[in-house]
Image (cartoon, rainbow, N blue to C red):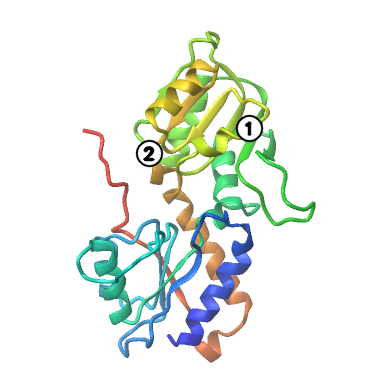
Amino acid sequence: MSVSATSRVCAAMQRIAPLALAGSWDNVGLLLEAPAASPAANNRVLLTIDLTTAVCDEAIALKIHTLIAYHPPLFAPLKSFTLATPLQKSLLRCAAAGISVYSPHSALDAVWGGLTDWLASIVSGAPSMQTPLFPPSTPDAPGAEGRRVDLATPTPMSELVHRVKSGLGLASVQVGYSPLRADRLVRSVAICAGSGASVFAKLTTPADVWFTGEMQHHELLAALANGTHVILCGHTNTERGFLPMLADRLRAELRAEGKEEEEGDVEILVSEADRHPLEVV
């Protein structure tokens, strides 16, 4: 796989999740461009949520050429780039192995049909009204921040929790019940992948339930006191299940270019080493 093939992958990802949709705070796109592909590199792309040491080991063993890490492994400004920290060491190992790294992060959250719409489909369970939490920047914008699901019929909180656990493949989730909503019937759900409290704090129209990965303690207390139930699933548990669908879309985008004969078919893999860092015991 050549450097031009990495450019193909980046361009395909840009079509799937335009980087203009990313938050101004985010760091997305091609974050590490390997100076040269390893002669042993295969025509493979690996998808992961996080670039951990285990994922780096996996990518090198699989002779990956391009790694798509949902979370940007480069985020805060750096004053040095050394082997002293595990993440920087993984990035340097990737560069040495000819592996480039791309991150779509919040662009993939915002795009229509992207990660947040996938979460909304899990919540809805039936035809329902689905809208962005905030209006898009323009009427023809390709996405917007967050999603709100207005359920077709009032749904017991227990049923909503069941849908979330089933849709995310989780044995358990954390649920906060507001004492102000004794009936526990849900008519509306606000959704944000990962850590959603800062997004929900901007809402002008309240929702019965906030569905996200994690919240800080006092953010959770405030939500419950204001009459909002909360479902927390673990930060990356709200993201990882979308990777197989992203893999399918990336395959389709690359095949639509019709360059397989010229540059070879690209194999898209989902990491088996990537996992949530916490276990329930």
Residue type beneath disc 2: Gly
Q: State the residue position of label 1.
A: 203
* Residue 67 pos. (x, y %): 40, 70
Q: Secondary structure at mark 1?
A: loop
Q: The residue tagged with tag 2: helix, strand or loop? A: loop
Residue 74 image-quadrant placement: bottom left
Instruction: Say if residue 158 shows up in the picture.
Output: no
Q: Tell me, yes or no, if residue 229 can be seen here.
A: yes
Task: Count numbered badges in the picture.
Answer: 2
Quadrant in which the N terminus appears:
bottom left
CA–CA distance between discs 1 and 2?
22 Å
Residue 172 appears at what percent x and percent y? 35, 31
| Of residues 92 and 41, the one drawn nearer to the viewer in this rendering | 92
The reply, left or right, for residue 162 in relation to residue 142 is: left
Q: Between residues 183 and 155, which one lies in front from this camera angle? A: 183
**Is residue 172 shown above or below 92?**
above
Q: Amino acid at mark 1?
A: Leu
Q: Nearer the viewer, mark 1 or mark 2?
A: 1
Please name the residue shown 48% across and 80% down the image.
6
Q: Give the residue displayed 50% in from the left and 35% down from the top.
A: 197
The residue beneath circle 2 is 234
